[in-house]
Amino acid sequence: MRKGRLIAVFVVLTIIVFLANTVFLCSCSREPAGGTSKEEPDEKISVEESDEVADSIDRNLVSANTGFGFKIFKELILEDSNQNVFISPLSILLALAMTYNGAVGDTNLAMAEALQFKGFDLEELNSGFHDLMVSIKNADSDIELAIANSIWYKLDYSVKEDFIERNEKYYSSEVNEIDFAAPEAVDTINGWIEEETRGKIDKMLSEIPADAVMYLINAIYFKGNWTYQFDEGLTSDDDFYLLDGTTKKVPMMSQEEEFLYYNGDNFSVARLPYGQEKMAMYVILPDEGVSIDTVIESLDAEKWNEIKESFYSSKVSLVMPRYKMEYGIKLLNDVLINLGMGIAFDPHLADFSGIFSREPGESPWISRVLHKAVIEVNEKGSEAAAATVVEMMESAMPVEEIIEFVVNRPFFFVIADDRSGSIIFMGKVVEP
């Protein structure tokens, strides 16, 4: 691998851990394996059973989840084009899937379209995510992978029991009713996230707004050692080529090993396995002179499947950076609206009456979707964590709004006959 080809690959390299290791290991059986319940939040199955679940993949659901991952990532690199980007599509999907269980009518349809849930009934979807979580948590005894979900709702707020039961049954969600106005409430929620991410993510919430009624949260933690570890003695500072053409000295790890490899039209891919080789990081490297964003734009679920089916084993001289990075706390509202679920964020149109006993137009809405992810890659392996927080609010008692309209800068005006719609005068004032 030529060092000159190391052109700002963080943006792709750091999504692959969670795209490859979680979204693609999916099952969609009708009934959850083992029938988890709130009494069994950490359902255990054998490695052999985990393999069986992974082998019973529903290709449609896998393709849908993969498609969502690439779509939201493409939206994010438009917003943060010159920055490192790292997300867990699975974390985002799980938090929003829990929320989706209470979406009704047009809100349900819009979320299904945006999250690629269209075509799956709720039982199929929930069972699929359940089996996915159980399978990947038990996939490899040499890898630590933890997934946790929780729901926190406002003290004395009415939440539908069937919504709670579905989230406990399929998502092993911990459910807590707490006083959001209490000074310790925000620390309690942040403390849960910190504990479930092994201290990697804290302070996701700075405050709890007065109108907040519910938080739906996912947390993921991953720690895996490379199957073929790098020799720390071979790591040395070398040039990394940045987007603007300049170079930066960074610690470069190196090894020569037999890896699965793919050589495409304008990029190549190396598969770096963890543990017992059931999970891997896929490093995607653009050819010299090819923009990393161009490569990302060319990827979707179909292309990814084509790549995975085209790997061949080859001796690879691998040189890659040792690094740490974090992304977020990122507000995902705009990218999710761009993907089509804007109605879920609309206080007047959102319908989550499947969660709360409210009429459409009166039910709470999604006010914020927050996401943060961190990763460290070194000679031994990788450690990563992610958290997604869906915040829901309701309207306070309506108060007549007084709009301030202070004309203290250049303005444009029109004088018109409102009966006919005819404009009689128009003008621009820059100096009264």
Image (cartoon, rainbow, N blue to C red):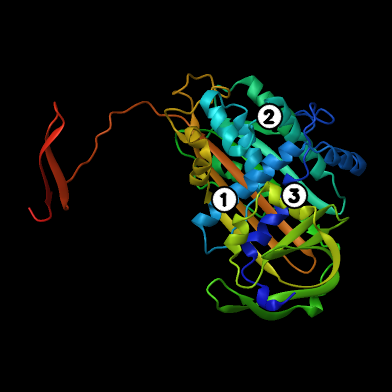
Query: Which callout, 1 or 3, points at the residue further toward the start of the chain?
Result: 1
Query: Which callout, 2 or 1, points at the residue further toward the start of the chain?
Result: 2
* Mark 1 crowdedness (10 Å alpha carbons): few <14, some 14-19, many ≥20: some
Distance between the alpha carbons at the discs numbered 1 and 3: 37 Å
Quadrant of the frame with the N terminus: bottom right
Circle 3 or circle 2, nearest the eye: 3
- What residue type is disc 2 on? Phe
Q: Nearer the viewer, residue 50 or 151?
A: 50
Secondary structure, mark 3, is: helix
- State whether residue 297 is above or below residue 421: below
Which numbered circle lies on residue 305?
3
Circle 2 or circle 1, nearest the eye: 2
The residue drawn where x is 53% and y is 28% is 107
* Mark 2 crowdedness (10 Å alpha carbons): few <14, some 14-19, many ≥20: some
The residue drawn where x is 11% and y is 47% is 427
The residue carrying mark 1 is: 203
Answer yes or no: is residue 88 visible.
yes
- What residue type is disc 1 on? Lys
Q: Whole-percent x and y of residue 252?
A: 71, 75
The residue carrying mark 2 is: 120
Query: Which callout, 3 or 2, points at the residue further toward the start of the chain?
Result: 2
Q: Whole-percent x and y of residue 37?
A: 77, 28
- State whether residue 190 is above or below residue 328: above
Q: Is residue 157 left or right of residue 419?
A: right
Secondary structure, mark 1, is: loop
State the count of labels. Answer: 3
- What residue type is disc 3 on? Asn
